[in-house]
Amino acid sequence: MSENTNVVSRYTTAARINHWITAASLILLALSGMALFHPSLFFLTNLFGGGQMTRAVHPWIGVVLAISFLGLFFRFFSLNLWTRDDTVWMKNLGKVINNDEEGLPELGKYNAGQKLVFWGQSILILLLFGSGLILWDVYFEAYTSIDQKRLAAVVHALCAIGAILIWIVHVYAAIWVKGTLRAMTRGSVTRGWSWKHHRKWFRQEVGKP
Amino acid sequence: MATLQSLDIRRRSASTDTPPQVRQSPVEVAKLIDVSKCIGCKACQAACLEWNDLKQPIGYTDGTYNNPTDLTPTSWTVMRFTEYEHGDDLEWLIRKDGCMHCDDPGCLKACPAPGAIVQYTNGIVDFVSENCIGCGYCVKGCPFNIPRISQVDRKAYKCTLCSDRVSVGQAPACAKACPTQAIYFGSKEDMIGHAEHRITDLKSRGFKNAGLYNPPGVGGTHVMYVLHHADKPSLYAGLPDDPKISPLIGFWKGIIKPISLAAIAFAGVFGFLHYITKGPNEVSDSDQRKADELAEGKPK
């Protein structure tokens, strides 16, 4: 870890590896899934070695994502429990979007937006995993009726779009809020960043509540 | 390769291009299966295996005449036997099951692989195996539960209506083989005309509900049945009374697609516009200073 004392440690190496496995599998799933979702995007199957390969490999990447995300879930869920401050923060979302965070409550490790990303992806990935098993004909064709598979296909498509939209919000927030990305690339953030965005957490980290 | 020319394609799965229009609209074909004339000999099944060079592995008997017990990747047609008891009467209903070649094919609508399913201008719906990716979406799209995915090559198979024979002016193998001429083949118009003749005959013999099965819910079919009990198609081993493409499939393959892509594009554009109008959220010097003051006041 960095010896620089002017930074605050935010993610362990294990947490970062866990995150990036999840990130990589989610991107691969989105690309292979979109290829089979919309004919205009079928060309994306070429990235995976053709249509048959895309069809075969997509569910296995899903298994990697499910296991990897489960790791993230247990790592972070207690930090993502909703508090009264989160409700206040959400009511001031307009100010946040305008880069005006004055007067908002001091936040712990995560703000309400991050918590919504966490819970949104948790629910959607659970639904995607369940519906994905129903659609995984190679192994599970015999266990469900055609009508159940039809419903699973719709649920899978809708949840995937939801997860992609949340992913866009997640990535954009990291681009928009400067100094965020290094939390996941280097494991640490600057003191200023911590003060500005997660002051309650910062106070705990430096032992000055 | 598809067995008919690309000029003869009316619809192609997962494709938005306009199909070729230059040819005069050709004759639509149909197979008419007169259930009342079928003796259940399975010559059609044998002819199908023979012509298409298929071999159904030896299976098991379930105590009925159904053999094999269901459609398989190598058995594209199967006779389904039903014992229909009403009052003191017993009727042995025998239906040759297989692809109905819907005018509005649910399999083609559901297929995500461009050109894996085509509908020819003569109405035949054909699977082009080289493009098939084995996803099983056709199974979900089909209102008749017809396509079967091979466990060997993960490709979908079903009756081709002998599109290779039809393209050179021959009738399908099953029609050729039927010893009682329960299977007719010709233009759809002629087949409807012939069915009317048969229905009149059946009605004169006491089957007052005799009729033609050409379900409008899927735009009509290019395989039609003459049924003695056309008021109750489900008597015939669960032939759907009013088949339609599931609304779930319509939703999945219809409105969700453009709305989803629009939502994703909107999210991307919104982010970009936000960045260029509001700018990045940056830590100010004063934030940095206050943070340092707090941290450095900490006793070591």
Image: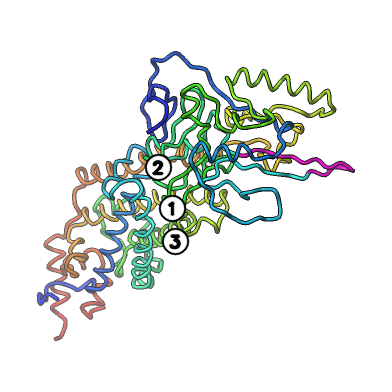
Q: How many marks?
A: 3
Give the residue type that dot 2 points to. Answer: Cys
- The single residue placed furthest to the left in the displayed view is A4
Residue B124: x and y, percent? Answer: 51, 28
Chain on which label 2 sits: B
The stretch in magenta equals B84-97
Instruction: Give how far apart the Cα atoms at labels 2 and 1 are.
Output: 14 Å
SS category of the residue bearing label 1: loop
Residue B86: x and y, percent? Answer: 85, 42
**Front-lying residue, B170 or A173:** B170
Give the residue type that dot 3 points to. Answer: Leu
Q: Are marks 2 and 1 in contact (CB under 8 Å)?
A: no
Residue B162: x and y, percent? Answer: 51, 31
Q: Residue at x 37, y 36 (%)?
A: B114
Residue A41 occupies which quadrant of the picture? top left
Instruction: Give how far apart the Cα atoms at labels 3 and 2 are.
Output: 29 Å
Q: Which dot, 3 or 2, sits closer to the camera?
A: 2
Lower position in the chain sequence, tag 2 or tag 1:
2
Q: Which dot, 1 or 3, sits closer to the camera?
A: 1
Q: Which residue is mark 2?
A: B132
In the rendered image, residues at marks 2 and 1 fall on the same chain? yes
Q: Quadrant of the C terminus of chain A?
A: bottom left
Q: Is residue B85 above or below residue B17?
A: below
Chain on which label 3 sits: A
Give the residue type that dot 1 points to. Answer: Val
Q: In the picture provided, is A60 more to the left or to the right than B96?
A: left
For mark 2, does the 10 Å Cα neighbourhood hold few (<14), some (14 to 19), or many (20 or more) residues?
A: many
Q: Which dot, 2 or 1, sits closer to the camera?
A: 1
Q: Which residue is mark 1?
A: B152
Q: Residue at x 59, y 21 (%)?
A: B188
**Front-lying residue, A206 or B73:** B73
